Image: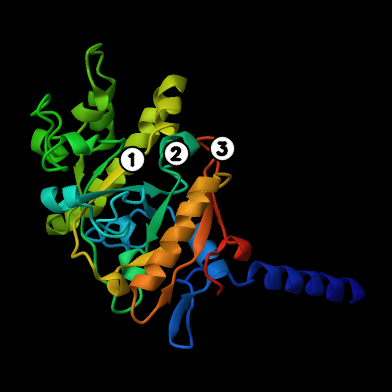
Amino acid sequence: MRRSSGLMAMLLITLMVSCAPIATKPPEITMADGVQILDGPDTAAYLDTLYNRNFPNCNKTESQPAFLCSGVTLRLTIKDPLNVYKVWDPSPISLQNGAVSFSYMRADTNFGGNAFGWDYQNGYILYPFLEAPAGKAQLFYMCSYPMDGWTQQRSPPCGPHPFYPYHSNLCQYHNVTIAEQWVYVWTYPDPNAQHPIQQCGFDVSDDRNTFAAPAFRESLRSRALLAAKTPAYATQVFNDHNEIIIKTWTPGRPNTFPILAFFYIAGNSKGLADAQYNQRDFYNSTSPKIVVPIIRLTPAASLGGKASFSYSAEEQALVQ
């Protein structure tokens, strides 16, 4: 009986540890003197949760692509030197072409620190729409490029590049619907091919209904299949980000903008300084005031590694 009691106690302890709370829900928003504050540690833990959710879709529904409830949608930013627009608003160029570029990180679609580039060491992260707080605007995802789509050379950004008017159009327009087909085009032995502008983007827009989730899923699979081809392709994938195109939104409405966090790349002091500026700027632009946390993003060290998200009170420009 003593041995059974000891075993039961061990099982109970194991159960208690395994049931320890994890941040499966968005961070708590508290009010202090009329200021909305997003909990920093909760935000970092929630980002880890989103990053590790390798969902094929949301709510087991093919009309709900996985970006609505999983993964980390982020935008790399540089402060406008002329201060014409805020980093969380569309740039003047984006207002003209109707789209804004983002990237999407998840445990099954990694990219490393080199993918960010030296000039882009900070930015912001969006809430997944299905878990955003009430009152936040919905942003509409348009297309997904498995690799950097060089969309600054496309008009519109989800459209074809003039050098490859057929192959670079939306994938379904030339019968590319699965990752294997996308990889075939990328790896076709053409020494003169310019892969970023030749690639097609997967149409993940809302009006595709039940084709939207499969299209996004194949976009993510394309990176994995390309990386599995050869070590050289694996390096190429790890050192390049994907590109997600989101429809422009109405600027000048920070209180309803679905921002979850500002971030900077671990070890980059300029990135941290810019994130601190953006945190203060966002706070000063909102009414009522909102404090959005700064999160340190440590990219994966290898294609099979894991990125991580952490919060440090000492790195905040505003005291929570």
Q: Are dots 2 and 1 in contact, CB under 8 Å?
A: yes
Q: Nearer the viewer, residue 293 or 273?
A: 273
Estimate how packed mark 2 is, as few (under 14), some (14 to 19) or many (20 or more) residues with alpha carbons within 10 Å. many
Up the image or down, 161 lies above or below 139; here it is above
Work out whether mark 3 precedes mark 1 in sequence or the reverse, and give the earlier one. 1
**Amino acid at pointer 3:** Ala
Up the image or down, 43 lies above or below 94; here it is below
Work out whether mark 2 precedes mark 1 in sequence or the reverse, and give the earlier one. 2
Quadrant location, the N terminus: bottom right
Estimate how packed mark 1 is, as few (under 14), some (14 to 19) or many (20 or more) residues with alpha carbons within 10 Å. many
Q: Find residue 111 and name its label.
A: 2
The x, y position of residue 268, in whole percent, is: 54, 44
Query: Can you name the residue that lies furthest to the right here?
Result: 2
Q: CA distance from mark 2 to mark 1?
A: 8 Å
Looking at the rendered structure, the secondary structure element under dot 1 is loop
Up the image or down, 285 lies above or below 312; here it is below
**Amino acid at pointer 1:** Asn
Q: Are dots 3 and 1 in contact, CB under 8 Å?
A: no
Q: Nearer the viewer, residue 9 or 112?
A: 112
Which residue is the site of mark 3? 301
Point 30% across, 70% down: residue? 254
The x, y position of residue 114, in whole percent, is: 46, 34
* Residue 298 visible to the viewer: no
Q: CA distance from mark 3 to mark 1?
A: 17 Å
Q: CA distance from mark 2 to mark 3?
A: 9 Å
Q: Find residue 242 and name its label.
A: 1
Horizontally, is 46 left or right of 154 in the view? right
The x, y position of residue 293, in whole percent, is: 49, 66
Query: Can you name the residue that lies furthest to the front here?
Result: 82
**Amino acid at pointer 2:** Phe
Point 41% across, 75% down: residue? 290
Query: Can you name the residue that lies furthest to the top here?
Result: 191
